[in-house]
Image (spheres, grey):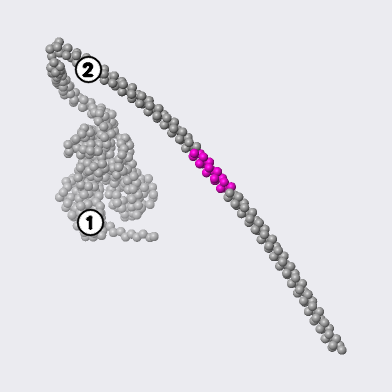
Amino acid sequence: MNIVFSVLLIAIGFFVGFILTFLINSLKVNSAQKKADNLISQATKDVEKIKRDAALEQKEVAHKMKLDLDREIKEKKDEIKESENRLLQREASIDKRDELFQKREIALDEREDKLSEKQLEIQDAKSKVEEIKQEQIKLLQEISGFSEDKAKSLIMDKVKENMNREISEYIRERENDAKLNADKTARELIVNSMQRYSADIASDQTVTVVDLPNDEMKGRIIGREGRNIRTIEAITGVDLIIDDTPEAVVLSSFDPLRREIARVTLESLMKDGRIHPTRIEEIYDKTCKEMKNKIIQYGQDATYELGLTKFEPELIELIGKLYFRTSFGQNALKHSIEVAQLSGLIAGELGENVLAAKRAGLLHDIGKSIDHEIEGSHVEIGANIAKKYHEDEIVINAIASHHGDTEATSVISVIVAIADALSASRPGARNDSIENYITRLNQLEEVGNSVEGVDKAFAVQAGRELRVIVKPEKVDDIGAHKVAREIKEKIEANMKYPGTIKVTVVRETRAQEEAK
């Protein structure tokens, strides 16, 4: 009985559980359905709202575009209206101008008619005057008994006779006056020109003294076993004289440009403090570049001083190089400026072109700037340079004729020759011994450079020594002695010189690499 009752209770429990589970699931399904319906309803509302917002935004954009389009249309209409107004104004102006032209044309026609009437009246008056004139001439011919042609002939013969006599007397008087005053006038002209131009007398020397901060610097310049001084002398071609003179080194060279480069190089080395062969070469290369700029500055200063323009840059550099050339000890650039000034003054006195005379005077010795680089006289070289840079024929002839090698074809050429002679003949302006000395040193270096295998040759010790640097890849140690002997024989055969000349051949092999 108890078992049956228990089974019954279990069955009832299962049934009640099943019913409760079904009810609970039904409630959950209903709740989920409601949530889903709510979500769908909310989504529908959101979609409707988005549609309304999009429609409003589209309407706003369309409205804004319409406003912009209306504004642009209005602006275009305003521009078209302004253009129409301008066209109307221009049309009105053209109409007024047309009216004025028509009025002027009418006035001109009226004036032309009046002028035609006046011309007819004048022609009638001329005809009447001519008739009266002919009547008077006939009356005079009847009274005098001479025809018109015969009277003209007698008068012209008389006038010619009187004029020939007066002209002959005038010419004779002027010739006498010219003979009496020509010499006096020429002297006064030259003296006045020389007085109006004044310049210092300066002769270039062949040595330069470099001041040292202390005597210890001499040892640093010489270097270990003399390597520094050998390097300086080799790359500059200048002889360094280091003696007992306190705090001073003497640079000796006949070439002022080499001497100046060596001076600046040495002073730069002393300021830098690092004195060794590599640094010496670096400073030397830098100084050479700076010296080129200085040469150009010398040329520009000369042209500015003379008031001359329109020079080619290469010609300016050649003019500047004259600063480092000498003629009988006289600085070539200063001499050229002096000749230009004197030429301008004389040309002004004679009424010639002053600027052309100055230009010819400045360029008359331009060939000396490179006469040591190419063959030929400085006159021939200078004329070729002037032709190369398209100088005027007057300037070219002045250069070619200032030493009498070519006939002068203009007054300015003669003026330049006179000014050149005046500049050279001033007391103390030139020194013949210096010129001969420089010529001898140039010739000495040319002999050294003419031998095969020679890289550079420098005349040092005032021409008592020729220092020759050979190319190590072409000349060996034994060949160096052969080069020295060959140069010695050429010097003895081709040159005249006082005393003796020592030939020193230097052969140096250097290995160099660059780490990168």
Q: Circle 1 is placed at which residue position?
A: 453
Q: Is residue 223 visible?
A: no
Q: Amino acid at mark 1?
A: Gly
Q: Is residue 36 rendered magenta in the image?
A: no
Q: Secondary structure at mark 2?
A: helix
The residue shown at (47%, 37%) is 87
Looking at this view, name the residue that lies furthest to the top: 143
Q: Circle 2 is placed at which residue position?
A: 130
Residue 270 image position (x, y, % from top left): 37, 48
Circle 2/circle 1 CB separation < 8 Å: no
The residue shown at (73%, 70%) is 32
User: Where, quadrant-wise, is the C terminus in this rendering?
Assistant: bottom left
Q: Residues within 10 Å of mark 1 (few under 14, many from 20)?
A: some
Above or below, comparing residue 8 to residue 391 in the picture: below
Q: Is residue 434 left or right of residue 15?
A: left
Q: Gap between marks 2 and 1, in whole Å?
A: 100 Å
Q: Nearer the viewer, residue 24 or 37?
A: 37
Range shown magenta: 67-84
Q: Amino acid at mark 2?
A: Glu
Residue 430 image position (x, y, % from top left): 23, 37
User: Where, quadrant-wise, is the N terminus in this rendering?
Assistant: bottom right
Q: Residues within 10 Å of mark 2 (few under 14, many from 20)?
A: few
For the stretch drawn in magenta, the main secondary structure is helix
Q: Secondary structure at mark 1?
A: loop
Residue 200 image position (x, y, % from top left): 29, 34
Above or below, comparing residue 93 to residue 276 in the picture: above
Mark in front: 2 vs 1: 2
Above or below, comparing residue 171 to residue 362 in the picture: above
Q: Nearer the viewer, residue 99 or 263?
A: 99
- The image quadrant that residue 346 belongs to is top left
